[in-house]
Image: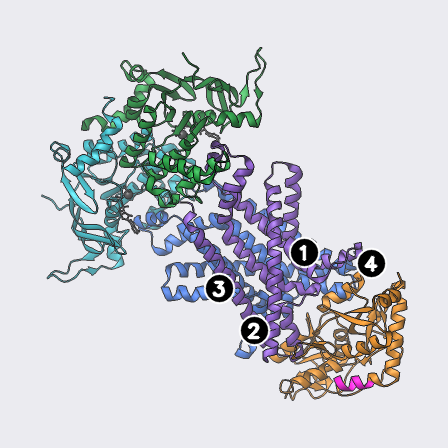
Chain colours: A blue, B purple, C orange, D cyan, E green
Amino acid sequence: MSIDFSIVWQQLPQILSAFWNTIWIWIVATILAVLLGFVVAALRRYGPLWLNLLLRLYVEVIRGTPFLIQLFLLYFGGPFIGLSLEPIPAGLIGMTIYGSAYFSEIFRAGFAAIPPGHVEAAECVGLSRGQIVRRILVPEMAMLVLPQLVNMAIILMKETAILSIITVPELTLVVGAIGSQQYAFVEAMTMLALFYWALVEISGWLGRLAEKKLSKFRFAV
Amino acid sequence: MSTRLFELMLWAAGKTVLLSAISIAIGLAIGLLVCAAKLSPRKLLSIPATIYVSLFRGVPLLVQLLLIYNLLPVLGIMVPSDVAAIAGLSLCTAAYQAENLRGGFNSVPRGLIEAADMVGMSPWQQLRRIRAPIAFRLTLPALVNEMILILKASSLISVVGVIELTRMAQNLSASTFRPLLFYSVAGAIYLVICWLVAGGGSLAERLMRTGSSR
Amino acid sequence: QDALERVKSAGILSVGTETAFAPFDFIDETGAHVGLNVDVFEEVGKEMGVEIKWVTLPWDGVLPGLEAGQFDMVAGPATITKARVERYRFLTPVAEATVALLKKAGDDTIQKPEDIAGKLAGAGKATAQLAQLQAYGETLPEPIETREYVGFNEAYADLAAGRIVAVANSLPNIAFVAEQQPSVFEVVLPPFGQKSYFGFIGSKRPEDQSLLDAVNAALLKIKADGRMGEMQKKWFGQSFDTPDEAPTPKV
Amino acid sequence: MTRPAVRIRDVHKSFGSTEVLKGIDLSVPKGSTTCLLGPSGSGKSTLLRCIAFLEETTSGLIEIDGDPLGFADPGGGRSRTRLSAGDIRRVRAKIGMVFQQFNLWPHMTALGNVTEALVTVQGMKRQAANEIGNQQLARVGLSDRGHHYPSELSGGQQQRVAIARALALSPDILLFDEPTASLDPELTGEVLNVMRELAETGMTLVIVTHEIGFAASVGQKIAFLDHGKLLLDGPPAEIFGTPRHPRLEQFLETYLDRGAATLV
Amino acid sequence: MTRPAVRIRDVHKSFGSTEVLKGIDLSVPKGSTTCLLGPSGSGKSTLLRCIAFLEETTSGLIEIDGDPLGFADPGGGRSRTRLSAGDIRRVRAKIGMVFQQFNLWPHMTALGNVTEALVTVQGMKRQAANEIGNQQLARVGLSDRGHHYPSELSGGQQQRVAIARALALSPDILLFDEPTASLDPELTGEVLNVMRELAETGMTLVIVTHEIGFAASVGQKIAFLDHGKLLLDGPPAEIFGTPRHPRLEQFLETYLDRGAATLV
Ligand SMILES: Nc1ncnc2c1ncn2[C@@H]1O[C@H](COP(=O)(O)OP(=O)(O)OP(=O)(O)O)[C@@H](O)[C@H]1O
Ligand SMILES: Nc1ncnc2c1ncn2[C@@H]1O[C@H](COP(=O)(O)OP(=O)(O)OP(=O)(O)O)[C@@H](O)[C@H]1O
Ligand SMILES: [Mg+2]
Ligand SMILES: [Mg+2]
């Protein structure tokens, strides 16, 4: 088996456009999932008990089943209940829901780690609920859970490969197709590994940078 | 769905659980070694460990599996499907578990180690009696998380010829053309397995709580 | 080492295939691996005096596995295409592979293949059928749109979900689909595109050729004495007239 | 005589089934300094937190400067009614609290901590707020530390930032929960001095403390809690003068035993 | 006169470029109690940690009962040489340390904490170790708490378990770093009493403390550190008697100012 990268090289524009798809879908879905996860965690902490239990069920079901199966049911099962989504919106929604369950657990731990005294101090000087969330909880949370958020974002990035099952033209689908059209499996796989590895390294590096920035206001004891 | 097909799904679920469990155990052992190497002050150990973690966390599991299964034979090493699946899963999870454990070891309070120094424990005794048990308690939730992730990620091992739960669902929907049914059943089985693992995890956490730090 | 000698002395011929490809290879309701391929290789095994060992993989892993030497040959079977002929050795065709369309049962807007003009149709990514569908689409007055799936089963699911109006696949395959789920799917006749065939695949490594020659000879014998036709009847409801030597296709 | 700054009437507080406060009656005169003493677990912090409405009492009433806090007595022996959130916020605005653990917000500088409420709650302009903030920081001797984050400040400095944060809103009543518990003698001295000055300005202070000497010299009123009951309540001369209450005698013993007297 | 238990000769210690100990000379007589006083940041903890070899000194020598700890003087003005890990462990076995933060191992019971080293380091049988462990727990008044985990013990109880853990190995020298800093007055009394008893048994104690009264009454020797230098070193009567060193006077001022005297 000879290895010849020129085969893959000729398809570079197509690969780059798929790479771009992977990146933007990943970034948008991660942002949405972080927001939804935060809302879920906040509602679980401050909302009524029944909502807490309901959301707990949501989180456990989403965490307990593979993304592939969720996506399949959403995309191919949706139309039977009147929810017919195009591939990219379906992929974004699926990833957002999937990620939100994990992010909400990270935030739940973060909420528990913020000393209750910090909230009490805010109550004492008269901050309202919303102000407490915006001015105290969110920034403190950011520095507490940043490493886990980055970790989870990286896991989500690799899950984007599964979007291929609903025909989203992302990196794995396109490079895989080129590989099997041209019978250049090893070349295609190497290419895939390189692209993902570069993405992971870059986002890990950004995460460490942000951590360093935030470490200035570590908790004073 | 006939009971026979349901049995098939359960058989495949058993395969998923078995291979995942073996991989998690082997991965934990490798992860411990990698973690020890990464914590080592010797560059000769810590740099390769860092590269290992970076590679195996960075490259998608699917690609790792295909490379193990299809590249090694080219080099003259035949790997049976099950072995390739276990190798891929355990090498991958080892990288994540090494990082979890490293976090655990790093957050063992320095004072507890100094106290062990003061009563004359050797480094090995400290590791065995103080550092490892405390680090393990700290990392248990992350380990449980990783187990669940590996259980689910094991759906990828069909690419090296192992028929596990997801692949069985695909196979059966391919002959009956009723994918929604089989995917729903597979999802439900995954859910039950993950719940059992998570339940076991929180039980273990509760059992160890008496000894938790203040 | 010569492949034929190796297989003969071990008494085992290992064959790679994908089991989500009815009616060639699939898992029946008892969980058994059945299909045309299983029956054909049963006969081949008898002819050659060896046992058949199946290695089942998702299609993504099958051709790489062949190149890596994970098994002696591939049952598949694969549509014989120009690109593939350049890279692999095809044995004598075992079924016709001419492409036809599958539509949703009761969809009156599509009566013949030309009716998909201007509409959205699907096929498996990087498949011969996709290439044929696209080529066919260009001959229509209004161009068609295509959507590519990781496998045909996802395409069927999307057809059932109503996002696409038709799936292009080889006639034997879609005929089987429609037979299994008559309330959901229906075949659009006649087939379109160029006549093509399904064949088993082997590698072009010199040491493999003796083995592939032997298998090919067994297949020809099975065809000649009518066993093949019976098996085709059993699985497809009809038998095909296939040439002994695969014609070199244009696409 | 004027209305008391804080008036506590028959306050009970239970956590689950354990009763922590068992009917407390106490009034804190305006402009006075009241020190709460008592052994560990006697309910001092809980009482202080009830006054700040960080805990809801189980029964009883608390009035701040004549206004009911949280619950009002409808009269006629009927059970108390809960007040609206707006009423609670309005009454609580008169109270400031300094926590034992400081509870500074770690993501804001010292100045940020002090001005936060001025800007977000009172809607003051950033510049005006900074002016007040700097003034308050200067008052506790920290003019040069405004741009440090809490993690960059020593314990005593953090404690003083917490005081400045409470002072910036110019509360009528300031509550302190063991403000010197984890400080070394020099820092303890610093913080006690700040409180002494505040007492002299005529602000109403309620201080939970283990510094018995400080309580004796600065407090105008000493309240001694034990097992959720107010055992003693009066001016220091009366409380500490002989003959002493036997429980207080026992409590002080450990303190005197530490050799505080041998030195002097 | 016998050899001193600890002898410190010209010890310097820097963290990076900041010099924390600037040439300390001190000898601790056998069987005596020495108290280290000094303002925050003066280097008390650092000195104690150097004696326990938890920090390596930058230069200078420390001898424990005549044996060099960590570094030996080869004589002839040549630079000091590092001793082997075995030598260090042998000498350090004579020293016990009680930390300010207790540092109990959270996954072991009180008894487990006390007996751990007896079993793993000294290779004692579990039963014999438990006997000694229970004896030591009884000595600090905790016979009934052996099977509690640290999280189930109060601060004072944890501190006493830490003392029992150090005592179980029967060290010749026991070091305490601010053993009462985070305890309330009653608990402080408990812990100080235990130390007082130890002092009476003739064990060599070195105590970093802010309890000046305790230091004055129990210490046979007082060492006063300031900015990494040993300013004063002598018996309490001499150190605390008038006229006092001006820096000490200033340090004590805040303490006396807290009103410790007014009460008595
Ligand atoms: N949230 C709570 N749930 C249950 N019990 C509580 C809670 N908060 C306090 N307690 C109990 O109430 C009692 C009084 O606690 P409180 O903190 O008021 O004591 P304290 O007088 O401030 O003691 P210390 O001097 O140690 O701070 C204690 O026995 C404590 O265990
Ligand atoms: N690991 C370190 N790195 C840098 N500087 C340090 C380190 N440890 C201590 N210091 C500095 O050394 C000086 C002395 O610290 P040390 O802990 O010995 O003081 P201390 O006398 O024990 O004070 P305290 O009474 O507050 O405990 C301090 O200024 C401190 O900032
Ligand atoms: Mg309290
Ligand atoms: Mg210190």
Residue D104's disc is none
In this rendering, the label closer to the viewer, 4 or 1: 1
Residue B185's disc is 2
Q: Amino acid at mark 1?
A: Ala
Q: Is residue A198 visible?
A: no
Q: Is residue A79 visible?
A: yes
Name the residue beneath numbered marker 1: B87
Question: Compared with residue E227, is residue A42 higher up or lower down, i.e. above or below?
Answer: below
Of the numbered discs 2 and 1, the one sitting upstream in the chain is 1
Q: CA distance from mark 4 to mark 1?
A: 23 Å
Q: What are the residue bounds of the magenta stretch?
A: C229-235
Q: Amino acid at mark 3?
A: Glu
Majority secondary structure of magenta residues: helix
Name the residue beneath numbered marker 3: A60
Instruction: Check disc 4 and report its element: helix, strand or loop.
Output: loop
Q: CA distance from mark 4 to mark 3?
A: 46 Å
Name the residue beneath numbered marker 4: A1
Question: Compared with residue D140, is residue C98 higher up or lower down, i.e. above or below?
Answer: below
Is the C-beta separation of discs 2 and 1 under 8 Å? no
Is the C-beta separation of discs 4 and 2 under 8 Å? no
For the point 17% across and 45% down, the residue is D230
Q: Chain of mark 2?
A: B
